[in-house]
């Protein structure tokens, strides 16, 4: 299966990278599934899952504003790093590509963007898959410490990290319960290093905030689109308990926990992950 060459499209004043993954032996137009990545990453980590699903979907992958290959312009823009703004970015991207209705597949911070998108534009979403997301409880001291630590993490990033032996393994250790391929680990580290400073720091503040704690339960409760929420059983970034709490708020949300996986169940156990996704999609069609 061949991945098509990525392209650049201007969305709300920012050049966004996007690419299509389509099955070469099934060229008939199909429903579109859009993939949204999480903090510090890029669309690259969705590649294998998109390839597997391309038999049934035309898969659209893109890099969020300020991450991956969606570089920010030198001229300041009148855009914030609120997650609602990223949901509006997605709507503008779909408009630019003449896509009316999609299946949405999103992860971590991207799943928060996904939930906000579904809330804002329910008529544009057929089905939603939210991965490694949930409901946080507000802790002022813990959030303040996280923001302070995050600022230093974002500030001190250097390309020479990529030359350090095992740097990719050390970087990903907190996110994983099972190991993943070396090229995937290296891609994560590279994307993290290349992420725009303002975008990386800004989304740390908006993702983990009192506002997010207050509004996200409402957004989960209001979802009117059939939704699958997937957690990794051993995820320490967004523990599975937070996903269960979010799913319990809404009968439209189906909850699945992938055993013995951390924050990237789609890569740590792609076989089980795909079985659960396909089961949900088949059930939703009935």
Image: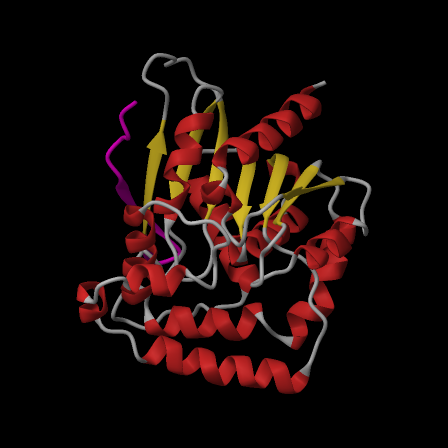
Q: Residue at x 41, y 55 (%)?
A: 64
Nearest the eye: 65 or 4: 4
Is any atom of residue 102 visible in this view?
A: no
Is any atom of residue 40 visible in this view?
A: yes
User: Image quadrant of residue 84?
Assistant: bottom right
Nearest the eye: 269 or 13: 269
Q: Quadrant of the N terminus?
A: top left
Q: Is residue 248 left or right of residue 277?
A: right
Q: Residue at x 59, y 32 (%)?
A: 277
Give the color scheme: rainbow, by chain, secondary structure or one colour. secondary structure
User: Image quadrant of residue 3?
Assistant: top left
Residue 251, relative to residue 4: is it above or below? below
Nearest the eye: 59 or 152: 152
Nearest the eye: 215 or 131: 131
Which region of the structure is painted magenta?
A: 1-15
Where is residue 173 shown, x and y percent of the image? 42, 61
- Count of all numbered marks drawn on residues in the image: 0
Q: Is residue 72 left or right of residue 276?
A: left
Residue 3 painted magenta: yes
Where is residue 185 shown, x and y percent of the image? 33, 53
Where is residue 22 shown, x and y percent of the image? 36, 24
Residue 192 painted magenta: no
Residue 274, relative to residue 68: is it above or below? above
Q: Quadrant of the C terminus?
A: top right
Q: Residue at x 65, y 21 (%)?
A: 282
Where is residue 130 shown, x and y percent of the image? 60, 46
């Amino acid at each position: 299966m061949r991945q098509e060459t990525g392209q650049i499209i201007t969305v709300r004043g920012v050049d966004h990278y996007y690419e299509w993954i389509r099955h070469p032996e099934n060229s008939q137009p199909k429903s579109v599934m859009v993939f949204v990545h999480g903090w510090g990453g890029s669309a690259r980590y969705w590649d294998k899952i998109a390839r597997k699903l391309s038999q049934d979907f035309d898969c659209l992958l893109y890099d969020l504003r300020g991450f991956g290959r969606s570089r920010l312009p030198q001229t300041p823009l009148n855009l914030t790093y609120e997650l609602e703004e990223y949901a509006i970015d997605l709507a503008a991207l779909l408009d630019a590509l003449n896509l009316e209705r999609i299946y949405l597949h999103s992860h971590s911070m991207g799943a928060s963007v996904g939930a906000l998108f579904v809330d804002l534009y329910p008529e544009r979403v057929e089905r939603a898959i939210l991965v490694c997301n949930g409901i946080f409880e507000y802790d002022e001291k813990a959030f303040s410490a996280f923001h302070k630590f995050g600022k230093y993490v974002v500030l001190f990033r250097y390309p020479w990290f990529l030359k350090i032996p095992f740097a990719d393994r050390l970087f990903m250790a907190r996110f994983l319960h099972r190991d993943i391929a070396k090229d995937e680990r290296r891609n994560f580290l590279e994307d993290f290093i290349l992420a725009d400073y303002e975008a990386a720091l800004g989304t740390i503040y908006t993702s983990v905030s009192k506002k997010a704690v207050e509004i996200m339960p409402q957004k989960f409760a209001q979802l009117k689109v059939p939704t699958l929420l997937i957690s990794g059983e051993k995820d320490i970034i967004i523990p599975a308990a937070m996903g269960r709490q979010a799913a319990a708020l809404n009968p439209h949300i189906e909850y699945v926990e992938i055993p013995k996986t951390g924050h990237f169940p789609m890569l740590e156990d792609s076989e089980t992950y795909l079985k659960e996704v396909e089961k949900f999609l088949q059930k939703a069609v009935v």
